[in-house]
Amino acid sequence: MDRWDGTKAFKIPFWQTTVKNREPLYFGVAFDICLYVPKGIVLDIGTGTGRIPTLVTNMNENINCVGIDINDTMLRHATLAKQKAECPDRLCFMKASAEFLPFADESFNMIVSVMSIYQWHHRLQGCKEIYRVLKDSGTILIMVDNKLMFSDKSGLDRNSDLRNILSNAGFRTVIALHNDHLNNLSPDFKFQYLKPTSHLSGVLLVIGLK
């Protein structure tokens, strides 16, 4: 079996309900992407149904978005979303993995991954690829479920491990914080819409600056 066939991703029942429940989260991420990137190109890794890129292009006419996923079912839904989008010409969805990004060096102004890092087979390799295709002074946002990141039988601090991975990949500044700590961010970080509400309970942001 091809290890990139996407069988590991969304291997849960009722994924449609999961995607629907995440709509406020997707909207918040899209809103803040537009704060970070007034114009440019954004990559969404593990795009699923393509909701974040679709929202971003609807919000800002000066942003183009690329979404990648390894799950064929998700990509079919993303393609349908593109057909119904307000600006389909600024959307692109393709099958690819984080570990082997089919893009030239310094292609993107910002890269995001929302609840998809669990499906990465080699996280360090994926983060190195992200660093490679991210423009200088670009930003990466990895969003994870805090409970999942800390539920480790080995007792390891997986949050700390993710910070180390990003640092080892080359990112000069790496921070990790819960959604209810966003008001304490330095002026370098612009996240404003992601506030401590029920749909964000337990969400952890890991941010890296190149």
Image (cartoon, helix red, strand yellow):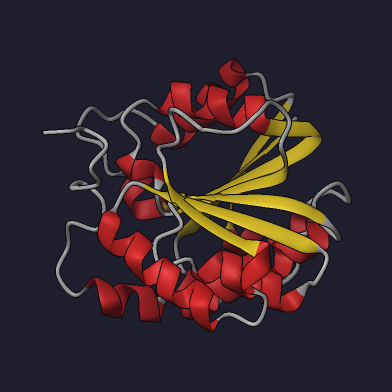
Q: Position of residue 85 (x, y in %)?
A: 58, 80
In depth, the one of 54 and 138 nearer the eye is 54
Residue 182 visible here: yes
Counting the numbered discs, the total is 0
**Going 25% across and 71% down the picture, which residue do you hit?**
15
Q: Is residue 149 left or right of residue 61?
A: left
Figure quadrant of the C terminus: top right
Q: Is residue 95 above or below residue 105?
A: below
- Of residues 86 and 50, the one drawn nearer to the viewer in this rendering: 86
Q: Residue at x 17, y 56 (%)?
A: 11
Is residue 195 in sight in this rendering? Answer: no
In percent of the image, x 73 and y 30: which residue is there?
A: 106
Residue 84, percent from left and from top: 52, 83
Query: Is 33 left, or right, of 157 in this rendering?
Result: right
Rendered view: 172 above or below 34: above
**Percent x, y for residue 59?**
74, 77
Q: Quarter holding the N terminus?
A: top left
Task: Provide residue 66's location: percent of width, then percent of height.
Answer: 59, 53
- For the residue pair 35 and 181, the one nearer the viewer reads as 35
**Residue at the (83%, 65%) spot, across then down:** 62
113 versus 31 height, above or below: above
Q: Give the answer, above or below, for where 45 lies relative to 61.
A: above
From the viewer's perspective, tell me whether residue 134 is left or right of residue 6. right
Q: Quadrant of residue 99?
A: top left
